[in-house]
Amino acid sequence: MEIKYKKLSEAELGTFIDMRINQLTEEYTSTGREVPKGVDLKSALLEYYHRHMADGTFVSWLAMDGDKIIGTSGMSFVEKPPYFTCTSGKLGLLSSMYTNPDYRRMGIAKELLDRVVNEARNYGCGSVHITASDMGVKLYTAYGFKHNGNFMMYNL
């Protein structure tokens, strides 16, 4: 088996979206919650990825075993007013980190993470943020991510 890496293109977008929905479902239900009924996440994701891939504010690297996508990553780029530790004001929002269970513990997630972090660095981001699943915390901590005790969220 030879794992290859490539950037996400329109050709893989349908499979990428299906994998993203599976990942979100796995994470959501692992906390004992039920996935809300009637949410058209597929259409919302398709619109998001089309728009942000086109304007360069979303990039994804894929891990491939032949023609099969076995791992995904994603980085969205946002901008806010500059501050002391991020004078560019540009932030990377990490998402879509997922490895097929049959391919876990092989370094694939670390390679995907490294590729999208480099994309954020090249974009000029001063930091990368993530809301990590329990499974991902070990990977992100080993990579050098730090917990931010001040992070808060307000749902609208």
Image (cartoon, rainbow, N blue to C red):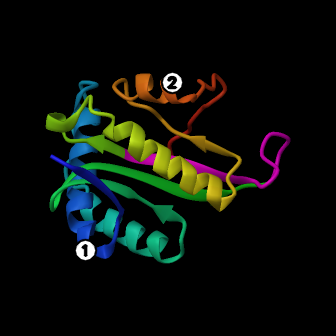
The image position of residue 110, as x and y in percent, is 41, 37
How dense is the environment of label 1, judged by Cα within 10 Å: few (below 14), some, or many (20 and up)?
Answer: few
- Residue 86 sits inside the magenta stretch: yes
Residue 46 higher or lower than 141, as above or below: below
Q: Secondary structure at mark 2?
A: helix
Q: Earlier in the sequence, mark 1 or mark 2?
A: 1
Name the residue carrying label 1.
11
Please state the extent of the stretch shown in magenta in the rendering. 82-96
- Residue 101 sits inside the magenta stretch: no
Which residue is pictured at 64% across the width and 51% down the height?
91
Residue 106 higher or lower than 79, as above or below: above
State the separation of the CA atoms marked 1 and 2: 33 Å
Q: Secondary structure at mark 1?
A: helix
Name the residue carrying label 2.
141
Q: Is residue 40 visible?
A: no
Amino acid type at mark 2: Thr
